[in-house]
Amino acid sequence: WDQKRLSKAKILVIGAGALGNEIIKNLALLGIGNIIVVDFDKIEPSNLSRSVLFRERDRGRFKAEVAAERAKDLYPDLKIKPLCINAVADLGLGLYDWADVILGGLDNREARLSINRNSFSVGKTWIDGAIEVLSGVARVFSPDGPCYECTMGEVDWKILQTRKSCTLLSRSEMLSGKTPTTPTIASLIASIQCQEALKLLHGMESINGKGFIYDGINFYHDLIGYKRKEECYSHDSFLPLNKISNSAKSTTLDE
């Protein structure tokens, strides 16, 4: 156990909902030193029953901001920055390159695909989590193996046309009482994600290119492997990166 290594670690967490709450909580308790949280959603009533870092008084606030505040309560030495932006449209490759590991706590395929392509563009590993009622999956995707896009089938590409939750529920349906997940499965899957990140940070072997599948109703679990698709676009890389001192704040497009 190398706590100094963990205190220097840099983690990019994308999604601050049920999974994101558990991920951020675990990272804080592990003593991870640097975290950036990305989520543009605000806290709604449906979030309160399954998000450990949110309170009733937080309704209407940005998820990322509240999650960052509560994480600091757990680990005061934590350097954590919330970004209330759209991970697909507004998150640049710089932060992907900054991170040692990227953790996804997402509820739609569009964002997953964006994270997948951006992570692979700069040669970084990302750990995906998905949950549904009492079941879920945690998957590790590294540039030297199969990626998220490699796992997508025809149905996934059709669903990609709409931004809905893992169970295909719309926002109005969730607000009306239809719950797409439970806090127990969020806790379980996020724990697996963080444990794999912990192994990666220590230089240990992870479940790269594999998924931990858990069926809570039948208490069934398995580790499945994925195959790389030769014609997968997500494997395109920008490496090696040529870093310059210019800033986006002070550089024009012409320059």
Image (cartoon, rainbow, N blue to C red):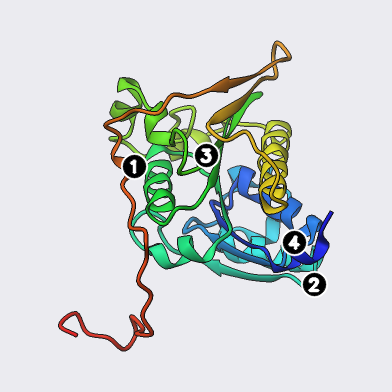
Q: Which residue is mark 2?
A: 76
Q: Which residue is mark 4?
A: 6
Task: Give the CA separation, mark 4 to mark 3.
Answer: 38 Å
Q: Mark 1 or mark 2, which is nearer to you?
A: 1
* Position of residue 99 measured from the top left corner of the image (x, y, whole percent): 55, 61
Name of the residue lying farthest toward the left: 254
In primary-sequence order, the first of circles 2 and 4 is 4
> Mark 1 Cα within 10 Å, few/some/many (few <14, many 20+)?
many
What's the amino acid at mark 1? Ser
What's the amino acid at mark 4? Leu
Question: In front here: 194 or 84?
Answer: 194
Q: Which mark is residue 175?
A: 3
For the point 66% across and 23% down, the residue is 134
The quarter of the displayed image where residue 108 is located: top left
SS under mark 4: helix
The quarter of the displayed image where residue 162 is located: top left
Task: Give the CA separation, mark 2 to mark 4.
Answer: 15 Å
Task: Give the CA separation, mark 4 to mark 1.
Answer: 29 Å
Please report contact status of discs 4 and 3: CB closer than 8 Å, yes or no.
Answer: no
> Mark 2 Cα within 10 Å, few/some/many (few <14, many 20+)?
few
Q: How many marks can you see?
A: 4
* Position of residue 22 measured from the top left corner of the image (x, y, whole percent): 70, 47
Q: Which residue is mark 1?
A: 234
SS under mark 1: helix
Q: Mark 2 or mark 3, which is nearer to you?
A: 2
What's the amino acid at mark 2? Pro
SS under mark 2: loop
SS under mark 3: helix
For the point 39% across and 53% down, the residue is 118
What's the amino acid at mark 3? Leu
Question: In front here: 150 or 40?
Answer: 150
